Amino acid sequence: MLKNKPDMLLTIAIFSLLIIGVVMVYSASAIWADYKFNDTFYFAKRQLLFATLGIIAMIVVMNIPYLTWKTYAKPILLICFILLIGVLIPGIGMVRGGARSWIGVGAFSIQPAEFMKLGLIIFLSTYLASNQKYITSFKKGFLPSLLLVFVAFGLIMLQPDLGTGVVLVLTCLIMIFVAGAKISHFVGLGILGLIGFLGLIISAPYRINRITAFLNPWEDPLGNGFQIIQSLYAIGPGGLMGLGLGQSLQKFFYLPEPHNDFIFAILAEELGFIGGTFVLLLFLLLLWRGIRVALGAPDTFGSLLGLGIVGMISLQVMINISVVIGLIPVTGITLPFLSYGGSSLTLTLLSIGILLNISRYARL
């Protein structure tokens, strides 16, 4: 039954994270923006624009019945695959940071892999809900879902973008598992996945360098270990209360592009353990309410769709913060709602709009 209002606690968590994100993007990027563009507000203004567009998209989608996405799941997935193929074509795809992951649209650019994450969640929710009776069958349920996921993963790896690919695969595997797939199927998949993952690492020297830098960053402090060392140098001095908003030292060209993947390090430096913990609690609130919404959805499609969206965001948070504090190697994953970025922020807010619409029908 439709409720008049979306889940309030989920909405509060989202807008709180957005506000913190815009403030921290300004604080982390002001020095870099002034040096590069002679405008300390350059990145902050663009982040505010992306957030505004994302909020508009979120509000629009929040008022579209979530079952509508089930109807258009196939066309959406097809468009996502076309974009993923298009980005690989020279002249269409743009190379940044060694990866051909962007398509230029006027003064802005989009990242097709971000669209694919949401598109695949929508399609997989539709497929699994319609074929749930076959999910325990390897050939009829598990394998078709898996093949689709790994085709998308393969196209993303051609860019290459291992971090986004890992988030996509893990999100989809969670959805398949919750839909009722046998654990025995995942055991075999885990062995093959481990072998494949090792192959991907060995095939690219820069990935091996990231692994060695993770194990001992001080072995090459001015090279492969530089970024993680500077991140830890930011987090350490933050202490309990932080140095104060705007008082970071690492953003003075020590930590490369601190407003992107490593923005949590600057947040911890300026706002301390208390500030970092508050942000983590907001993400936990989002996770809790998101799971409640998914579990309370009136049908299997809504449950899987909600779970996929929450899983995607939560995995990105866990991976990003794990990288920033040195628990895992650098992956290039942004922190949802906080890191600077157009495609990521807009698509994340659009996804939240779908989740908020599900909450209007859910039994909470």
Image (cartoon, rainbow, N blue to C red):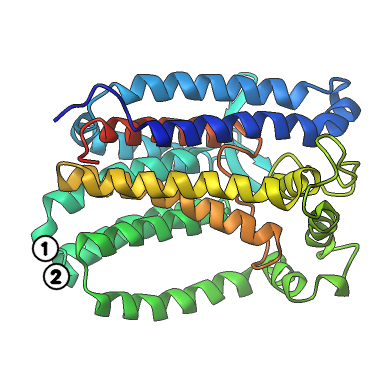
Residue 235 position by quadrant:
bottom right
Q: Residue furthest left?
A: 133
Q: Quadrant of the C terminus?
A: top left
Q: Quadrant of residue 176?
A: bottom left
Residue 202 point in image, percent of width and height? 62, 75
Q: Quadrant of residue 179?
A: bottom left
Q: At label 1, which amino acid type do we have?
A: Tyr
For label 2, the SS is loop
Q: Is residue 92 visible?
A: no
Q: Is residue 35 above or below residue 271?
A: above
Image quarter where the N terminus lies is top left
Q: Position of residue 285 (x, y in %)?
A: 46, 45
Amino acid identity at mark 2: Ser
Q: Are marks 1 and 2 in contact (CB under 8 Å)?
A: yes
Q: Name the disc covering residue 137, or none.
A: 2
Q: Residues within 10 Å of mark 2 (few under 14, many from 20)?
A: some
Pointer 1 local density, CA inside 10 Å: few below 14, some 14–19, many at least 20: some
Q: Which residue is mark 1?
A: 134
Distance of label 1 from label 2 (alpha carbons): 5 Å
* Residue 270 percent across, percent down from the top left: 80, 43
